[in-house]
Amino acid sequence: MKLQKVRIQDFWCIEDSEEFRIDPVTCLVGKNESGKTATLRALHKLKPASPDVEKFVPSRDYPKRKWRPDIPVSDTPPAVSTEWQVSDQEVSALEERFGKGILANNTYRLTISHNNKRLSTLSVNAEKAIDHLKLKANLSEEDKAAIAGIRTLEQLKKKLEETSPRSAGLQTLLETIVREFPNGILRAVSDQIQDALPTFLYFDQYLRLPGIVSVEELLRRSSQGALTDSDNVFMALMALAGTKIETIHTAKTFEELNSSLRAVSNQISDIIFQYWSQNRHLQVDVRFDHARPQDPPPFNSGFVVRTRVNNLRHRADTSFDERSSGFVWFFSFLVWFYHLRETNKGNLVILLDELGLTLHARAQADLLRYINEQLRPHYQVIYTTHSPFMIDPDQILSARTVEDVVITDPKTHVDALLGTKISKDVLSTDVDTISPLQRALDYEMTQTLFIGRHTILVEGPSDLLYLKWFSKRLELSGLPGLDYRWTIAKVGGVDRIPGFVSLFRANNLHIAAFIDVQSGQNQRIENARKALVEKHLLTADTYANQKEADLEDLLGWEFYAGLVNLTWSLPPRLRVLQTQPAEAVGGRVIVEVERHFSAFPAGAPEFNHFNPSEYLYTMEEDPTKIPGFDRTLSNMKKLIDDLNGLMVGAP
């Protein structure tokens, strides 16, 4: 099950969030006290791990300025309304039990009210279920004739109850209906779907790994079922390395003990430092020692486990507890969530409130990478932040702004409180709310972007150089080059175009884009097209006359092959053939050239598709001597003419 849309009403500071979309990883960004935590806490009540604890309590949860004890809860709108997509696997499970085509569509809606009652909405084809029941009952032709034409479960049940005597087949059919459908087909299907809903796990107090543990005290608490949060993280640390504290404690020889400890240390170091890029010269060392009598209790008797961190550069080690708060937080988070991923293979939605607050900007980027690589493939993740470095610029459209909206009447100057609103996209009316989003893009983009009044967005630096070079070449030939008012800006990928346009729309920029086209990008291209003014998205396939194309395909095989050969001064035996092979027709020239270079012997040059554009931009040879130049110039002229056509009527 995948959560698609959410609407929250009358919960804490949220009067009506309005409906907003949920992605595989969704970032809720907003100021402090904007309602981010309230959003997560409301979602948590959909299906928490402890349903008896996490319930709606109207006197506590209903907005205080609207709450009245005499208002029946049944008269209030649903607290949380959701829309889900039933997965193909879950559809198969439903069809196995209820019959092929039991669902009219894969959309499932669930609401939960302030009195904790749930209401499901889905489209079920009851006739398919009845046909399936008849088929499973293995009825005779006479039995089939007796119940022919009945299309509702209620009528079928009534008919069977009135039939006397009943054949074995009809009796089996009646017993199945009574046993499996006491409340009807719709309720049975809905119950199975609800069972498939993921569990929501909410985290705001992130557990901390202890740097030193008393083994005897830990084992005592474990036997009493009284493990603390710190104990649980330590046990997760052991599980991370595939062992248990009991295994280490009962080791009978030094070699057995040492092997266990080295395995723990090595496994943890490999996993943690895969994602901690702040210092690559660290190594985790887990030690099992006799306690020292002068240490503070309970670490002065029995055995203790110490987690130390070695700095290989400074040749020094420190206790884990003495490391920076950011490192301790990051280490503990990765240990706990690795354990969570290993022990919860089923459906989960993970809610993370203000994570990574103590981390440096680069460490926050490491944390985002961990979420995308380790959590995203398995679970949906919704997290809150007000840090620009916790917003993934490559997933900017998965950010939702959260605002506590107040509208002031211009005549009376009276404020009208609308409560928390959650955007459907990354737009916001509040400068402080949208600031982290702007900073997130600034950090990635403004180092290489010069934004003009009229801006052409391209994906990479080679596109920028080719456009500039061919514009100059057209001018040298007495033809119009690119309109001087255009500024070419590298955006870094088609995914970033909608976010860029949304965030800078307020500046009244005139924006067009030229992008490459590859298979599997239809939705991304459509998102970019919708973000731009009509006809302002130009795609390489249009000018290259093939389904998949990069700007290099506009240059043509003959010209680009000659340019590549010149760029690397390739000897005859390694040169790219300037006659396109039959098997490469219709394919992207970049892919074919990369394949050609991959067959080079060791020590030969490696292909980089930026180098030819750089070489062309600075070359001293006469480019018109490269075979295919005229055709290439003609193709680029078409593109540049179309870009200039977008400037008609522009200031």
Image: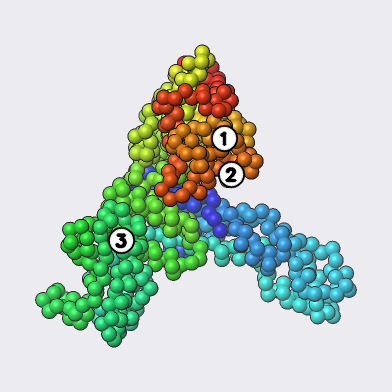
CB contact under 8 Å: marks 2 and 1: no
Disc 2 from disc 3: Cα separation: 39 Å
Q: Which residue is mark 2?
A: 519
CB contact under 8 Å: marks 2 and 3: no
Q: Which mark is residue 578?
A: 1
Q: Which mark is residue 331?
A: 3
Residue 535 quadrant:
top right
Which residue lies at the image location 83% right of the left edge and 79% below the top edge? 167
Give x and y (percent) for residue 607: 45, 42
- Under mark 1, the amino acid is Gln
- Under mark 3, the amino acid is Phe
Q: Is residue 131 above or below residue 416?
A: below
Q: Which mark is residue 555?
A: none
Q: Can you tell which of label 2 and label 1 is closer to the viewer?
A: 1
Disc 2 from disc 1: Cα separation: 26 Å
Give x and y (percent) for residue 483: 48, 18
